[in-house]
Amino acid sequence: MADPYYITTAISYPNGRPHIGHAYEAIAADVIARHRKAEGFDVRLQTGTDEHGLKMAQKARDLGTTPSELADEMSSHFKVMCDSLNIAYDTFIRTTEPRHQSAAQDLWRRMEAAGDLYLDRYEGWYSVRDEAYYDEAELVTGEGGEKLSPQGTPVEWTVEESWFFRLSRYQERLLDLYRSTEFIRPQSRCNEVMRFVEGGLRDLSVSRTSFDWGVPVPGSEGHVMYVWVDALTNYITGLGFPDETGDYAKWWPADLHLIGKDIVRFHAVYWPAFLMSAGLPLPKQVFGHGFLLNRGQKESKSLGNVTDPLLLAEQYGVDTLRYFLMREVAFGQDGSYSPEAIVTRANAELANSFGNLAQRTLSMIFKNMDGDLRPHHELTEADVTLGDAVALGITGLRRAFLDLDFSDGLEAWMRAVFACNQYVDEQAPWALRKTDPDRMQAVLMTLLRCVRSLAIAVRPVAPSAIDKLLDQMGVASHAREYASLSDDRWLEDLAESGFRIGQPSGVFPRLEMPEAAA
Ligand code: ME8
């Protein structure tokens, strides 16, 4: 039976519409999910929206609506974004669902039963925007001399009665976890978290009395859970927790929580500590990806550079956008995008290199030998060398993707594409039609094999375009996973159809450079 692989994204705050950072994270998670599926895993992908907390309550008040109406409207935009970007999620969770409330309350009761929760007074520097308290020593000074959180957001001195979680108890167990496993990736973020934990952990305030838009603390009227206790629980709510049979038994612990770098502390310190306290297994890995910047700048309303990711997808194509993001950014680091960068890369790599290779190969076959393909030929050294180069590129992609190193993986793939184009130029199959039709057959058959393998390899990144291409080539849907890379059964299917391929049409069109940049 296939091994299960459970991957989650962060759940987004639906206090506004999705931005490019949300799209980036969803796309990366979907590429990982599709890649693992292609590698033969039984995959589950969960995403959703984080609907409680002060931020939501305040935004709703500013807009003159209720938090629940705001969440309903905005959450639907996140779902539409996922659907439009071809994100194959299995569960879209909303933390306002009743089943989520029972899961969060159950986790709370377990932490209470472990003796890890106590009531006290909380005073400290609180950032509404980050929904976090900070130590005096962590604060920075703003341009006007005001105190700011390390993320640069305003902080206020706040006093309230609060439940506390005995985080301090877990310091050593957390450090052991970081030291003995690859719990936090990339390494730079692991180092940051280790420094933070080694500096000493203080107990964490985990309830609020100043507002009521949250999950009620069981048995403690007037308290709602700190939004992060509630939010982190989503990863098990979606599996039916507190029922520990069924989906939970199959999929927990998660293999990967994919999140952005700003929320690593919540996932790598608080979440494992909550789970240790509740006596539940820990996720296997937390990966903190970098931020996506618009021409090197953070998008913000005040700069007027906020881009709707769906408009980008509409303009350049979903598969092109997905390819660009995975290729351009070294995964784990910050990256930048601009319309010119998207068009340049899409044209150079997708349209002119892979698209052109596929189109040339299929058109020559369609024109010269449709219905007349023969799978077996005597191979020359050039054919064997090309086969090796393609195999190397694909192994490179697979290995790098397993390690979440997408840009390197796609670079290895691109090297194989270049090798194929060079082979076409050198072998010039069009010139062989009259002089040596057998050799033309062998060259085109070699190319057809290579195009199919390269298409299957990159399918997790550009699933719709690649499926269109594989349809044209008559490759059955069961022969599109990585297991079928090394067998020739697809040729038997093709033989059954009388070796006919469909009328080829390009799947990666050339894009126009935006006018401002031309
Ligand atoms: O943090 N580039 O929600 P969120 C890349 N609700 N990723 C970005 C980004 C950017 N410019 N901006 C944000 C929350 N992100 C919480 C999560 S999980 C239990 C609760 C990422 O809507 C960010 O790092 O602010 C996070 O992983 C995700 O988008 C949602 O951010």
Image (spheres, rainbow, N blue to C red):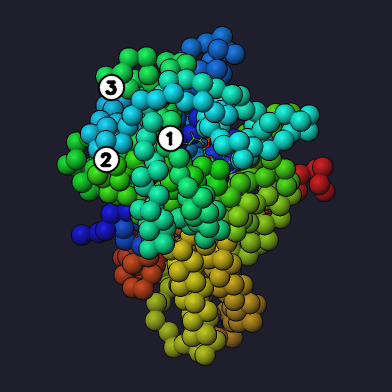
Residue ID for mark 2: 278
Amino acid tagged 2: Ala
Query: What residue appears at the point 41 percent right and 77 percent down from the top-left corner?
Result: 374
Question: Which callout, 2 or 3, points at the residue further toward the start of the chain?
Answer: 3
Q: Secondary structure at mark 1?
A: strand
Q: What is the CA distance from the residue labelled 2 to the residue labelled 1?
A: 16 Å
Mark 1 or 3, which is nearer the eye? Answer: 1
Where residue 229 sits, quadrant-wise, is: top left
Q: Can residue 311 be seen here?
A: no
Amino acid tagged 1: Leu
Q: Secondary structure at mark 3?
A: loop
Comparing 17 with 424, the one in front is 17
Q: What is the CA distance from the residue labelled 1 to the residue labelled 3?
A: 18 Å
Query: Is residue 289 shown above or below 483?
Result: above
Residue ID for mark 1: 204
Q: Which residue in the rendered view is the most extreme toward the top?
A: 64
Residue ID for mark 3: 218
Question: Which callout, 1 or 3, points at the residue further toward the start of the chain?
Answer: 1
Q: Secondary structure at mark 2?
A: helix
Q: Residues within 10 Å of mark 2 (few under 14, many from 20)?
A: some
Image spot of residue 485 (x, y percent): 38, 69
Query: Is residue 365 shown above or below 124?
Result: below
Query: What residue appears at the point 17 percent right and 42 percent down from the top-left corner?
Result: 245
In the image: residue 236, left or right of residue 19: left
Comparing 208 with 381, the one in front is 208
Image spot of residue 296 (x, y percent): 73, 47
Query: What residue appears at the point 52 percent right and 11 percent down from the top-left corner?
Result: 65
